[in-house]
Image (cartoon, rainbow, N blue to C red):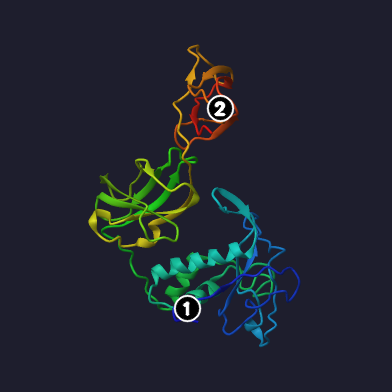
């Protein structure tokens, strides 16, 4: 194991006694490797999850070395990003272990000179006891508590490093592409925050296809954003390769300087680009229409194929598909036309 690194092990084989398997069963040290169990964080008593592996370790030794897992964290009904976009709810110790990774990262910011093992020991020794009194083979030491771990490290004579706001630092919050990119064009709505100490006046926005070094598109944002504030910027449409693929949108060079904390500058997202034309907006009936009633919408498109109706001109929700042109009765919501085929 490399110095300064710490391995977190996550395996689902519960609920039987001794169900923890390799590598989570290893016990080189009290927290090496550190096995993470799962609890239901949506229930006040934090019951251990059925799928969470139980100790003892099959590797022998005695006392705390034999007990597995070391600690637990929420792993049931966890809202998380889903493959190919959107969010869903998941179960698994694979969602418990990231809680512990994040806790160690927070402690590392406060105590940058301490090793991964020292920070893991802080979480281990400060965990909230659950289940039977004391360390056990369902919960280990118990639920992690970052605040308690922070105080435990101070009680051991460690002094935290005071946080310092970087001069030039931007946080990439979100980049949202069009759901359907027409005319071989793409554009993105980029949201970001000025986390630096100086007013943000310029920044480069660089877009690449995932895994490629060549720049697909580059744009410079120019404005005035005070420290601690955030804003949204709609990029001009740009020509992009056809198809559906992942792009990486990176924010860089705030105020012409290298970003002091660049790890939160890049977001990857799917984009769909096709060569079909974007049609003019639909013409609606001149009569007043109440919400929930019906109105007559007319498309200027006269060809064959499919018309897709959206509720907004960009970033809209697909409402309906129609296989022919002409007049249609639609419910009274603003509609726009895209993607004739």
Closest to the observer, 287 or 67: 287
- Quarter of the rendering containing residue 183: top left
**Residue assigned mark 2:** 304
Residue 51 position in % (x across, y down) = 70, 64
Say which quarter of the image contains residue 124. Answer: bottom right
Mark 1 or mark 2: which comes first in sequence?
A: 1
Residue 106: x and y in percent read: 44, 65
Whole-Å distance between the Cαs marked 1 and 2?
68 Å
Front residue of 174 and 128: 174
- Where does the image place residue 276, in percent across and percent down from the top left? 48, 36
Q: Residue furthest bottom?
A: 61
108 and 306: which is toward the camera:
306
**Total marks in image:** 2
| Residue ID for mark 1 | 118
Judge from the rendering whether residue 179 lies leftward or rightward of residue 9; answer left or right.
Answer: left
Task: Single out the residue that lies furthest toward the front.
Answer: 303
Residue 296 lies in quadrant: top right
Vertical order, 262 against 85 (above or below): below
Question: Looking at the image, which residue is at 24% across and 59% down?
Answer: 257
Q: Relative to 134, is 318 above or below?
A: above
Q: Residue at x 49, y 66 (%)?
A: 103
Neighbours of disc 2 within 10 Å: few (<14), some (14-19), many (20+): few
Image height of 174 relative to 61, above or below: above
Task: Assign a secondary structure to mark 1.
Answer: helix
Q: Residue at x 36, y 58 (%)?
A: 214
Element assignment for label 2: loop
Which numbered dot is residue 248? none
């Amino acid at each position: 194991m490399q110095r300064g690194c710490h391995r977190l092990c996550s395996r689902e084989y519960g609920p039987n006694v001794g169900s923890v398997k390799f590598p989570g069963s290893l016990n080189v040290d009290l927290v090496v490797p550190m096995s993470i169990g799962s609890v239901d964080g949506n229930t006040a008593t934090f019951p251990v999850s059925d799928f969470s592996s139980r100790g003892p370790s099959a590797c022998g030794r005695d006392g705390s070395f034999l007990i597995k897992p070391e600690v637990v964290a929420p792993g049931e009904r966890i809202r998380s990003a889903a493959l190919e976009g959107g969010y869903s709810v998941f179960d698994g110790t694979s969602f418990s272990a990231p809680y512990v990774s994040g806790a160690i990262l927070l402690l590392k910011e406060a105590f940058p000179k301490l090793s991964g093992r020292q920070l893991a020991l802080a979480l281990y020794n400060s965990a909230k006891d659950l289940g039977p009194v004391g360390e056990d083979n369902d919960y280990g030491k118990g639920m992690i508590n970052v605040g308690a771990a922070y105080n435990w490290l101070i009680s051991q004579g460690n002094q935290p490093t005071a946080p310092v706001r970087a001069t030039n630092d931007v946080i990439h919050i979100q980049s949202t592409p069009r759901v359907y990119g027409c005319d071989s064009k793409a554009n993105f709505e980029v949201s970001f925050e000025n986390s630096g100490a100086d007013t943000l006046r310029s920044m480069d926005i660089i877009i690449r296809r995932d895994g490629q070094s060549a720049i697909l598109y580059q744009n410079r944002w120019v404005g005035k954003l005070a420290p601690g504030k955030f804003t949204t910027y709609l990029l001009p449409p740009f020509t992009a390769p056809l198809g559906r693929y992942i792009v990486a949108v990176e924010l860089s060079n705030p105020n012409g300087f290298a970003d002091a904390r660049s790890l939160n500058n890049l977001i990857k997202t799917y984009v769909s680009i096709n060569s079909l034309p974007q049609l003019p907006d639909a013409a609606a009936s001149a009569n007043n229409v109440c919400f929930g009633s019906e109105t007559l919408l007319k498309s200027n498109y006269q060809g064959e194929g499919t018309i897709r109706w959206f509720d907004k001109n960009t970033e809209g929700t697909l409402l309906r598909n129609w296989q022919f042109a002409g007049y249609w009765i639609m419910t009274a919501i603003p509609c726009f036309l895209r993607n004739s085929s």
